[in-house]
Image (cartoon, grey):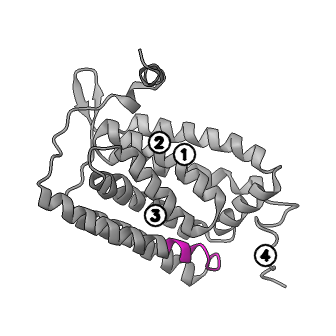
Amino acid sequence: MTLRQRLLARVPAWLVEKVPREHDEPDEVFHRRRRVVAATSLAGAGLLGASLSSTPDSARFYGLTAATAATWVVGGLASGPLHLGRVRYRDTLRRPVVTPVLVGVGAFGVFYGCALVCRHVPFLDRAISRVLRYADRGSTAPVLATTLLNGAAEEVFFRGALYAAAGRRRPVVTSTAVYVLATTATRNPSLVLASGVMGALFGLQRRATGGIQAPLITHLTWSVLMLRFLPPLFRHHGLPVDPDLPSDTG
């Protein structure tokens, strides 16, 4: 047994066992998908970087995040057919729901544990605080809506259109790499690291199920838990996260 086979034997079946699917596309459709994906990647990355350089809880922030999500969704749908995917349950194939939720909860648990450590590393503490200020300073409903909208939109594009455009050779690696590159536009190392870890997990779910439903549910579950429980860890001395920013009240 090779090293790869031994490693795969230790990975949960829902991440490595692919369900049957027929997703073959004519060359013309495939090449068109790639052109749309390339243009969308550039536009979306630019908007993502601009949104996270804007003032938290501002009209500009919400406008740019909405534009980013719209770009991912429009580009994803325009590229060609997308699929929801299925998982094997006993002798039937079903839409994935429960397992992706549990995976999202588990991923949050791992990140929460890492966050407890990162609080004591100044470089990482500042990087995470800069991101969480958007949650801490914003109104609950708009921030939650923004989080859910962008999480779903990213899956439509990165695990939907982009994954399909990657072809048969290492689509998990390719889609994750582009996801990380797009996230570098934020210039925040904590987001880049998270995109690498979660992008690989989402990609494996996409590979196993043949669609975007599993990674989408996991992404939303993980994001909501992070939004709810991480900001309190990075409040310093009762101040909002990222206390290096000037006070709004003067």
Residue beneath disc 2: 201
171 vs 32: above or below: above
Amino acid beneath label 3 = Asn
Amino acid beneath label 4 = Leu
Amino acid beneath label 2 = Leu
**Element type at marker 2?**
helix
Q: Which mark is residue 197?
A: 1
Left or right: 152 as drawn, with respect to 194: left
Left or right: 94 as drawn, with respect to 114: left
Quadrant of the image for the N terminus? top left
124 vs 71: above or below: above
Between circles 1 and 3, the one closer to the viewer is 1
**Element type at marker 4?**
loop
Determine the image quadrant of residue 238.
bottom right
**Element type at marker 3?**
helix
Q: Which mark is residue 245?
A: 4
Determine the image quadrant of residue 190.
bottom right
Q: Which mark is residue 150?
A: 3
Query: Measured from the top left, where is residue 114 in percent x and y?
Result: 70, 43
Between circles 3 and 2, the one closer to the viewer is 2
As rendered, which of 91 and 208 lies closer to the eye? Answer: 208
Farthest residue in the top direction? 1
Span shown in magenta: 47-57
Query: Measured from the top left, where is residue 75 in percent x and y?
Result: 31, 68
Q: Answer yes or no: do the residues labelled 3 and 2 have beta carbons within 8 Å? A: no
C-alpha distance separating marks 3 and 2: 18 Å
Between circles 4 and 1, the one closer to the viewer is 1
C-alpha distance separating marks 3 and 4: 25 Å
